[in-house]
Image: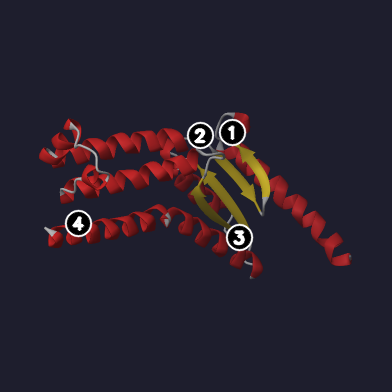
Amino acid sequence: MSVCNNINVTFFVTSLLLCIILCTDNYVWAKDNEAESISKIGQGVGHIMNIYYCYSCGYRKVYEDYAGIIQQKYPEISVIGANYDPPGLNMYLSRMIGFGKMILIMCILSGVNIFAWLNKPQPAWWSWCLENKLYACMMMFFLANMIEGQLVSSGAFEISLNNIPLWSKLETGRIPQPPELFQIIDNTLQFSKMEMPNNNFV
């Protein structure tokens, strides 16, 4: 009995560590993108355009399309995209739900009775989950993902060039058409070229 308990505890701790790694993966990825952007600016490699988009809204494909046409028209511009983290507690709640989802799924697959650790009687719904592991895990996975998506769904598509805001879908309510975005980029690049002689003079 003690051997089984030790195995369950070890499995639970391992699952906990795995969930922490998965939950912090997006944060590390965002920091890597930021570091890449800073390194390129420091090396003087052209211009840096950042596009922060709502991944749960399906804007990843839109970002890829815009990044392609921008780099084709402006080879000197490096386009870097990342998920837009909504302000407030929504992102933290989403990560907590994802963390709890992974813990519960691991407990169901391993047959761990978490209520026994809490000195509580096992409820009927948890017994059903242990008897129907595959169906319970799938239902819990998709339900938690739906809630997470609603929490982080911001509808954002924010574009900036060299830290200068060019477009905000949160403010305008729409994604810019390519011609109007090109016009904004041309104006911004022209304005930055006009500032360069003054900066050199100073």
Task: Using the image, tell me which numbered label, if any, was put on residue 170.
Answer: 1
Which residue type carries mark 1? Leu
Q: Is tag 2's residue or tag 4's residue first in the polypeptide sequence?
A: 4
Residue at position x 75%, y 54% in the image: 192
Task: Using the image, tell me which numbered label, if any, was put on residue 8.
Answer: 4
Q: Position of residue 80 (x, y in %)?
A: 53, 55
Q: Is tag 2's residue or tag 3's residue first in the polypeptide sequence?
A: 3
Which residue type carries mark 3? Glu
Estimate how packed mark 2 is, as few (under 14), some (14 to 19) or many (20 or more) residues with alpha carbons within 10 Å: many
Estimate how packed mark 3 is, as few (under 14), some (14 to 19) or many (20 or more) residues with alpha carbons within 10 Å: few
27 left or right of 191 in image: left
Task: Using the image, tell me which numbered label, if any, was put on residue 155.
Answer: 2
Residue at position x 28%, y 60% in the image: 14
The residue that label 3 is drawn on is 76
Task: Using the image, tell me which numbered label, if any, was put on residue 93.
Answer: none
User: Residue 178: which quarter of the image?
Assistant: top right
| Extreme-right residue of the structure | 202
Q: Position of residue 145 (x, y in %)?
A: 34, 38
